[in-house]
């Protein structure tokens, strides 16, 4: 039986942090044995906002190395760089031509980022969700792991596939039934650890774009810096930690991190820390974080010291990704009526 296919990716801007690992990459690792997994470094998305050209290539290699260091196995997954598969850009353009402008203007993330960028906002930022749709639809993905903040983008990809391509351009079989051009993906919502919050504000998601470095623990932070950030993390005056109290978002977030990083799980962590003060808890969390990240950091250092092997992994991934993507792109080209090459 064909395994369901999963597609996901992370931008190579900023440093990957605990939220990226626990909310995304750690779950990707668990999917490798049961799914056909494609993981890309989405560097085309990285230039929808101002970026540093001199860092883009190295940041792309860093992100790919962290994928592997966190447990993505190139023997079981296809790991590749988005911009190295030209079908992403071409399908994005084809989808642009059938996607209504008002669908993009209602995207919440665009509205939020456009306010911050003012007159400097780019067409690329507006078009970001169509490129994301192309990323997904090129690989006939059955499932796309998404957090709450990406659900709207996945819905757009589904709408484009179903309403703007399949409904309008699907060829008919011998019985007059439509043959779908694109597979309509389903969301894969992974619960535990899916939303890691900021260390400085338990009601805001941990983010690479937050200007406050103390708001996140980066995967490559040294032990002393991890300890320092956790020591300074925002808390409340209440003794004892607990889950589920909306008045105590920092308690919920930090206890959740401890439950995952220590490997104890939520029930055991809640019982252990129910009567514990913050001064006792924070060193426990810091130790758990340092130990959980130690093997990731060691493996990352090995991978970055062997650039040739890392690039070979990405080349192998590019070749497989290009084969699959080219077939999907050709179906769309045919459906839209282009002259065959």
Image: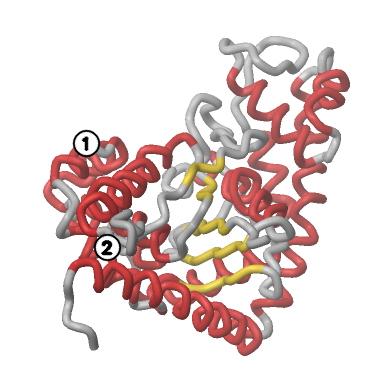
Q: Residue 10, relative to residue 277: is it above or below? A: below
Which residue is at 80% across, 21% downward? 270
Residue 316 lies, in percent from the top left, at 58, 83
Its colouring scheme is secondary structure
Secondary element type, mark 2? loop
Which residue is at 31% across, 55% downward? 178
Residue 72 lies, in percent from the top left, at 68, 64
- Mark 2 or 1 closer to N-term? 1
Which residue is at 54% across, 84% downward? 315
User: Can you tell which quarter of the image residue 106 is in?
Assistant: top left
User: Can you tell which quarter of the image residue 116 is in?
Assistant: top left
* Label of residue 171 in the image: 2
On the rendered image, what quadrant is the N terminus found in?
A: bottom right
Residue under numbered circle 1: 106
Camera-side residue: 311 or 133? 133
Q: CA distance from mark 2 to mark 1?
A: 31 Å
């Amino acid at each position: 039986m064909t395994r369901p296919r999963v597609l996901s990716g992370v931008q190579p801007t900023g440093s990957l942090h605990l939220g990226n690992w626990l909310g995304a990459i750690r779950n990707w690792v668990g999917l490798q044995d049961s799914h056909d997994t494609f993981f890309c470094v989405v560097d085309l998305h990285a230039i929808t906002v101002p970026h540093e050209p001199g860092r883009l290539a190295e940041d792309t290699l860093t992100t790919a190395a962290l994928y592997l260091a966190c447990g993505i196995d190139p023997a079981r997954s296809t790991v590749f760089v988005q911009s190295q598969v030209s079908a992403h850009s071409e399908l994005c353009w084809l989808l642009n031509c059938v996607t209504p402008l008002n669908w993009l203007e209602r995207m919440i993330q665009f509205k939020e980022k456009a306010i911050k960028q003012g007159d400097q906002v780019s067409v690329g930022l507006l078009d970001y969700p169509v490129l994301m749709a192309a990323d997904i639809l090129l690989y006939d993905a059955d499932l796309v792991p998404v957090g709450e903040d990406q659900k709207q983008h996945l819905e757009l990809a589904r709408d484009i596939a179903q309403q703007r391509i399949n409904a309008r351009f699907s060829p008919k079989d011998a019985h007059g039934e439509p043959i779908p051009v694109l597979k309509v993906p389903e969301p894969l919502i992974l619960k535990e650890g899916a939303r890691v919050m900021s260390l400085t504000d338990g009601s805001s998601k941990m983010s690479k774009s937050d200007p406050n470095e103390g708001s996140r623990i980066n995967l490559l932070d040294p032990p002393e810096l991890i300890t320092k950030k956790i020591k300074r993390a925002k808390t409340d005056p209440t003794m004892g930690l607990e889950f589920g109290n909306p008045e105590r978002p920092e308690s919920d977030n930090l206890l959740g991190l401890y439950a995952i990083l220590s490997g104890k799980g939520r029930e055991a962590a809640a019982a252990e820390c129910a009567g514990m003060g913050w001064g006792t808890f924070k060193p426990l969390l810091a130790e758990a974080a340092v130990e959980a990240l130690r093997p990731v950091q060691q493996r990352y250092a090995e991978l970055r010291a062997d650039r040739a092997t890392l690039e070979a992994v990405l080349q192998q991934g590019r070749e497989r990704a290009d084969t699959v993507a080219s077939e999907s792109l050709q179906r769309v080209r045919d459906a839209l009526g282009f002259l065959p090459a």
